[in-house]
Amino acid sequence: MPHDQTRPRPHSEGARFLQESFAELVAEHGVPGASIAVLAGEQVITAAAGVTSLATGVEVDTETVFQIGSVTKIWTTTLVMQLVDEGLLDLDRPVRDYLPELVIGDRAAGEAITTRQLLSHTAGFEGDIFTDTGRGEDAVERYVASLTDLPQLFAPGETFSYNNTGFVVLGRLVEVLRDQPYDQVLLDRIARPLGLTSVSPSPYEAILHRAATGHMPTRTAPRRRRRPGHWPAPTRRPARCSR
């Protein structure tokens, strides 16, 4: 008789089931490596499969840290809303009221865009500007300074269009209102209060941990990704923080 996968499992049985199922999925979909944490009542069940890098073959474990890319938009949004809660920011005032250094190609639109529109991906300017302004505490500031010719695609608030550029602008807004670099604000106001001790905004810090290399899919197999992203804590710790 087939095993009933819906019935409750003891922790050890659930852990075995998760590990086996997860490993099968990772292999089936050609994922180089991954880890997972499931919050089951008061218990956190973890599993890992694959390798940290196709070049080295080092196995992923449940303490491996991964690049999280645009998941950081949730963190940036949280930092912005903390400013709102403290009365330091009005979502519906123009961003330039707080960030006069923001100058884009369409000057009139630049004067009108609000923080709410940046958060909701409705600011209307080109959203995929990936200018590399290097490392250092002024990297975000230099990125915003590079936007003087940024094209406006539609009027602010007119429609939704996913916007990476806008979230870097929000990061700079956080820096200015907190008078601290973005990375430091992130660590002080999100990572450390949640006990996420392995969060590393810099790849130079990530190498102190068991870090997975980013990969990009190709038609035949994944390949390593060159550009590093933000590095979070191992999966177990965010799962505990969700309780």
Image: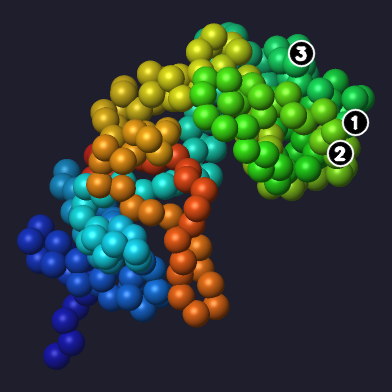
Name the quadrant of the C terminus: top left
Dot placed on the residue nearer the N-terminal end, 2 or 1:
1
For the residues labelled 3 and 2, the Cα–Cα distance comes to 18 Å
* Residue position marked by numbered label 3 in the rendering: 100
Residue type at the position of mark 1: Asp
Dot placed on the residue nearer the N-terminal end, 3 or 2:
3
For the residues labelled 2 and 1, the Cα–Cα distance comes to 6 Å
Which label belongs to residue 237? none
* Residue position marked by numbered label 1 in the rendering: 106
Residue type at the position of mark 2: Gln
Which residue is painted at 60% across and 26% down in the image? 140
Mark 2–mark 1 CB contact (< 8 Å): yes
**Identity of the residue furthest to the bottom in this view:** 1
Q: Is disc 2 placed on a helix, strand or loop?
A: loop
Q: Is disc 1 placed on a helix, strand or loop?
A: loop
* Up/down of 98 relative to 210, above or below: above
Expressed as whole percent of the image width and height from the top left, the position of residue 32 reads: 36, 66
Dot placed on the residue nearer the N-terminal end, 3 or 1:
3
Name the quadrant of the N terminus: bottom left
Which residue is painted at 86% across and 39% down in the image? 152
Tell me if 197 is positioned left or right of 9 in this view. right
For the residues labelled 3 and 1, the Cα–Cα distance comes to 15 Å
Residue type at the position of mark 3: Pro
* Residue position marked by numbered label 2 in the rendering: 152
Expressed as whole percent of the image width and height from the top left, the position of residue 93 reads: 75, 17
